[in-house]
Amino acid sequence: MGSWLMLLVVLSFMFAILGFAAVLYYFLSQAFRGKDALVIDTPEEALERKI
């Protein structure tokens, strides 16, 4: 029974780590959009742009 409990603990930690990574990826992808990185602005356009 001890090995089953250890397996359950390891699987729960893996689920928690992957869930945290998914939430972090979601919020970072919302904050830093990939399309904006491809646009090259002049300094004047960058000052006028809303963030």
Image: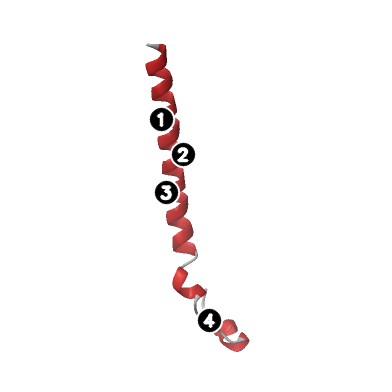
Q: Which residue is mark 1?
A: 12
Residue flagged by tag 3: what amino acid is it? Ala
Quadrant of residue 19 within the rendered picture: top left
Dot 3 lies on which element? Answer: helix
How many neighbours does mark 1 have within 10 angstroms: few (below 14), some (14-19), or many (20 or more)?
A: few
Q: Which residue is mark 2?
A: 17
Residue flagged by tag 2: what amino acid is it? Ile
Precedes in sequence: disc 3 or disc 4: 3
Precedes in sequence: disc 2 or disc 1: 1
Q: Which residue is mark 3?
A: 22
Precedes in sequence: disc 2 or disc 4: 2
Precedes in sequence: disc 3 or disc 2: 2
Quick check: marks 3 and 4 in contact, CB under 8 Å?
Answer: no
Residue drawn at x 59%, y 87% as measured from the top left: 42
Q: Which mark is residue 49?
A: 4
Task: State how far apart marks 2 and 4 are (Cα).
Answer: 37 Å
How many neighbours does mark 4 have within 10 angstroms: few (below 14), some (14-19), or many (20 or more)?
A: few
Quick check: marks 2 and 1 in contact, CB under 8 Å?
Answer: no
Residue flagged by tag 4: what amino acid is it? Arg
Q: Nearer the viewer, mark 2 or mark 4?
A: 2
Q: Nearer the viewer, mark 4 or mark 1?
A: 1
Dot 1 lies on which element? Answer: helix
